[in-house]
Image (tube, grey):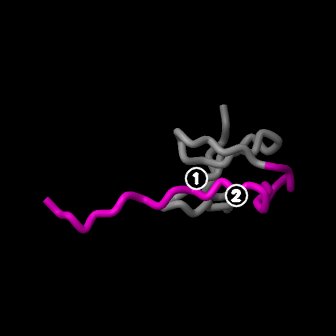
Amino acid sequence: MNDDIQPAPAFDRRMLEALICPQTHTTLEYDMAAQELISRAAGLAFPIRNGIPVMLIDEARKLD
């Protein structure tokens, strides 16, 4: 067993105040369970990897 493994850093919810959707420039919602930032206006979900939001449209998942 490796004791050096650390849990992924948590997303700092205060970042939501500064982040906007790169496509629509609207506010985002934080989905803690999916570790995504949701842009309802664009219909996209931006992943959060290791506590860092990936705000690239090419990396976003389309919402159903």
**Closer-to-camera residue (62/32):** 32
**Closer-to-camera residue (22/53):** 53
Which secondary structure class fits the magenta region best? loop
Q: Position of residue 21 (x, y in %)?
A: 78, 55
The residue range painted magenta reads 1-27
Name the mark on residue 16. none
Left or right: 5 in relation to 42: left
| Distance between mark 1 and mark 2 Cα atoms | 17 Å
Determine crowd level at label 2: few under 14, some 14-19, many 20+ residues with C-alpha closer than 10 A. Answer: few
Determine crowd level at label 1: few under 14, some 14-19, many 20+ residues with C-alpha closer than 10 A. Answer: many
Residue 25 picture quarter:
bottom right
Classify mark 1: helix, strand or loop: strand
Where does label 1 land, which residue? 47
Where does label 2 land, which residue? 14
Contact flag, marks 1 and 2 (Cβ < 8 Å): no
Q: Is residue 48 above or below residue 5?
A: above
| Type of amino acid under label 1 | Pro
- N-terminal of the pair, mark 1 or mark 2, is 2
User: In percent of the image, x 51 and y 59: which residue is there?
Assistant: 49
User: In percent of the image, x 24 and y 68: which residue is there?
Assistant: 4
